[in-house]
Structure formats: C-alpha cells, structure tokens
C-alpha cells in the first residue's frame, strides 16, 4: 500500500486571526469546468491587500489577471486554493434521479474550500462570499456549519471586498488555463478546439456544439450536456432505451417525472415487459454496459 502525501504546512501567520474570500468562475458557460477559488490571509494584512489592485476579474483583461495571479502566488502573506468541478460531474449531478442543483453544488464547493483551509491549521475568523441564491439563507447555512466564523454573504462581493476580488482572480485564471489546456478525451479526427468562450450566447460556441454532436453519444465530455443550450441540438439524436428506467416503470406502474426530463437532451425511455429486458449485460463492452445501451436489430 502506498502512503498518502502529508498535508501542507500552514503558513507562519496561520495562527493569527485570518480572513478568507471565495468566488467562482464559469457558472454560466456550457463548456468546461466550473471553478471555485479562495484567497486567505491574516486579518492584519487586510489593509495591504487593498493596495494590491485586485478587482472583480470580469473587469480586468486577461493579461492583467495573469499578472495579478502570479503576484499573489509569490506573496508569502497570502494563501489560496481552488476546487475545479468537471463538466461531467456537473451534468451527472444535475441529471441523476436525486438531483443536485447548481446552487447546491456551489454551496458544497465553498464549504469544501473552507474545510480545506481549516484542516491545514489556518485560524479563519471571517469568510466573505458572493451570494448564490438567497443571501440570508446562504449565510445562515454556512453559519450553522461554521459557528465560530463570521460569515458575510453579499451581492457583488468581488467588487466590495479585496479578499473576494483576489479569489475571483484565482478562480478565473484557473478556469481560463484549464479550458485553454483542455485535453479532449474523444479521438475523432474532426475534433476542433475553436469553441470560443464557452458561453451559450457565443456564436463560435454555438457553431462548435452543432459541429461536434453525435447522434448516439451526444457531445464531447467538455460539454455540460445538462445545460438547456444543448436542447436544440438533440432533435436528431437516436432514441435510447434505459433498461433500469423501463424496469422501474414496470414495477411502479408509472413513469418518473425526473427521468422524463432526460428527453430534453435526447435520451428517452420506452416501456417494455420486465422479462424482455436484457439484465445481465454479459458479453457487452463495458462502455455500453455502463451506459445501459443495447443493440438495435433494425436502425
């Protein structure tokens, strides 16, 4: 058995009261990961932090964001961390039977970052975040989990608090680099990387989605296929029988509203008698077993 790497050592100032800012990048795009980033420092460093020219990352040019990110990485009085949420994970959580919506995914990511920083021995006393959903409900939720930390949830927090502005830069640069260096899992010869910004309204992104859809396998794994943007491209998709869903319908005597929503991305369910459904899956490729795909006698 291999041994796990030891946790990172806390910075020298970690035992002093510290503040943290949390922000995200990539909540809206149909392509690529969503990234949550945090920045933390001693509360006594707060005034200096305000002189480092951090600002909401959306207001800065890419070159300036990159420069500020390298500066904060080199600053020994600042700590930072990220949570990169893969597009496949986003789609999986939002489409499975017990759905997890985007707000809850966001909340869980922020909670994870706070726990991560606490676990290395940083004395967090204040955490500042941009609102996700109802600001007061979000604050109360975090305050119940972290009763010893002052939680501040505010709209446009990345414009109000330099510690959140810094977190915004961490998240945005990390996402930009991840998208720029993304290695496509698919091996088709006609795969292109000219997918634009990844935002649904970007004409280049729309064209890329249109050119990279597959009638059986949908979209490349870069795509968040749970996004409504993908709906208009699914009309030509092949109808797929999900064996487990057909069995559930037979057993329960009713269809599942949750599963019917999968039709919006090209996946549908068909009623079949339980005894007619192949359940063993023996002899089939693991790829098809995992996706509950079956051989069609006629196409």
Image (cartoon, rainbow, N blue to C red):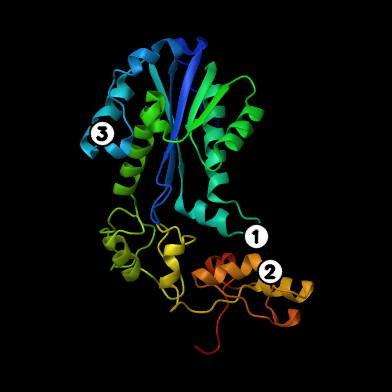
Q: Secondary structure at mark 1?
A: loop
Q: Position of residue 40 (x, y in %)?
A: 44, 22
1 and 3 marks in contact (CB < 8 Å): no
Q: How many other residues sit within 10 Å of disc 2, few (<14), some (14-19) or many (≥20)? A: some
Query: Where does label 3 land, which residue?
Result: 66
Query: Where does label 1 land, which residue?
Result: 97
Q: Report, in whole angstroms, how far the alpha carbon at label 1 lies from the one at label 3.
A: 40 Å
Q: Report, in whole angstroms, how far the alpha carbon at label 1 lies from the one at label 2.
A: 9 Å
Q: Of residues 69 and 12, which is closer to you in this image? A: 69
Q: Which residue does the image show at 40% across and 57% down from the upper left? A: 30
If you read the primary sequence from the N terminus, does the residue marked by circle 1 or circle 2 appear first? 1
Q: Is residue 121 visible in this depiction of the protein?
A: no
Q: Which residue does the image show at 38% across and 55% down from the upper left? A: 31
| Quadrant assignment for the N terminus | top right
Identify the mark at residue 256; answer none if there is no mark. Answer: 2
Q: Position of residue 28 (x, y in %)?
A: 41, 51
1 and 2 marks in contact (CB < 8 Å): yes
If you read the primary sequence from the N terminus, does the residue marked by circle 3 or circle 2 appear first? 3
Q: Of residues 73 and 51, which is closer to you in this image? A: 51
In the rendered structure, the answer to whether residue 260 lies left or right of residue 10 reads right
Looking at the image, residue 142 lies above or below residue 18: below
Q: Position of residue 194 (x, y in %)?
A: 25, 59
């Amino acid at each position: 058995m291999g041994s796990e790497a030891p946790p990172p050592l806390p910075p020298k100032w970690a035992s002093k009261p510290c503040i943290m800012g949390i922000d995200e990048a990539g909540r809206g795009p149909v392509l690529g990961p969503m990234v949550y980033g945090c920045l933390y420092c001693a509360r006594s460093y707060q005034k200096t932090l305000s002189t480092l020219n951090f600002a909401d990352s959306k207001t800065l040019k890419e070159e300036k964001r990159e420069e500020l990110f390298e500066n904060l990485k080199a600053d020994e009085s600042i700590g930072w961390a990220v949570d990169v949420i893969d597009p496949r994970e986003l789609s999986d959580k939002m489409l499975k039977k017990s759905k997890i919506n985007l707000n809850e995914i966001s909340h869980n990511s922020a909670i994870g970052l706070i726990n991560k920083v606490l676990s290395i021995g940083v004395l967090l006393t204040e955490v500042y975040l941009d609102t996700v959903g109802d600001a007061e409900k979000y604050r109360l939720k975090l305050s119940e989990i972290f009763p010893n930390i002052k939680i501040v949830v505010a709209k446009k927090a990345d414009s109000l608090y330099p510690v959140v502005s810094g977190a915004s830069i961490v998240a945005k640069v990390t996402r930009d680099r991840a998208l720029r260096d993304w290695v496509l899992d698919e091996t088709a010869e006609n795969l292109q990387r000219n997918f634009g910004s990844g935002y649904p309204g970007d004409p280049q992104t729309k064209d890329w989605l249109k050119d990279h859809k597959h009638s059986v396998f949908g979209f490349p794994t870069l795509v968040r296929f749970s996004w409504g943007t993908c709906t208009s491209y699914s009309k030509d998709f092949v109808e797929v029988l999900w064996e487990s869903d057909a069995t559930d319908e037979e057993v329960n005597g009713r269809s599942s509203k949750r599963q019917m929503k999968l039709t919006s991305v090209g996946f549908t369910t068909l009623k079949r008698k339980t005894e007619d459904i192949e359940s063993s899956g023996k002899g089939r490729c693991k790829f098809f077993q995992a996706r509950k795909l079956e051989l069609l006698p006629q196409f």
